[in-house]
Image (cartoon, rainbow, N blue to C red):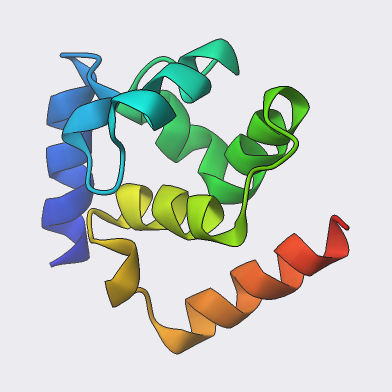
Amino acid sequence: MKYKIKKDIKRKSTMGELSQLPNIGKKLEELLEQAGINNPAELQELGSKEAFERLLLIDEDACLNKLFALEGAIQGIRWHGLSEDDKKVLKDFYQSLK
């Protein structure tokens, strides 16, 4: 199933629409573009942690839920569906940035 998700992300990357990914609304899409992330392929290549660090440079109030949203978008799922292991790793990363 993950292969299909990644394949779908690559297909969408040709359209350049971040907001077509799960968890990415127009506001977050605008922030990502301001951070230099312009399409799903770039988001996937950077990964959620690097993308979040870029967001922090322009939005110092970026929260843990945004980090979860980015990871969910990369995985092709709503962030609520992230595994507990993924959530723990991301939470630990988020706390290391404080």
Q: Nearer the viewer, residue 22 or 40?
A: 22
Position of residue 83 relative to residue 82, above or below, is below
Residue found at x 31% / y 72%: 80
The picture places residue 39, in percent across and down from the top left corner, at 35, 20
Query: 92 and 58: which one is in front?
Result: 58
Residue at image coords 25%, 61%:
78
> Horizontal placement of 43 versus 7: left or right?
right
Would you say 87 lies left or right of 21 here?
Answer: right
Quadrant into which the C terminus falls:
bottom right
Q: Residue at x 63, y 49 (%)?
A: 49
Query: Residue 64, percent across and down?
Result: 60, 60
Viewer-nearest residue: 62 or 44: 62
Considering every residue shown, the one lying at the far front of the view is: 61
Q: Residue at x 70, y 42 (%)?
A: 61
Q: Is residue 92 above or below residue 47?
A: below
Q: Count the marks: how many?
A: 0
The quadrant holding residue 1 is bottom left
Image quadrant assignment for residue 14:
top left
Q: Residue furthest bottom?
A: 84
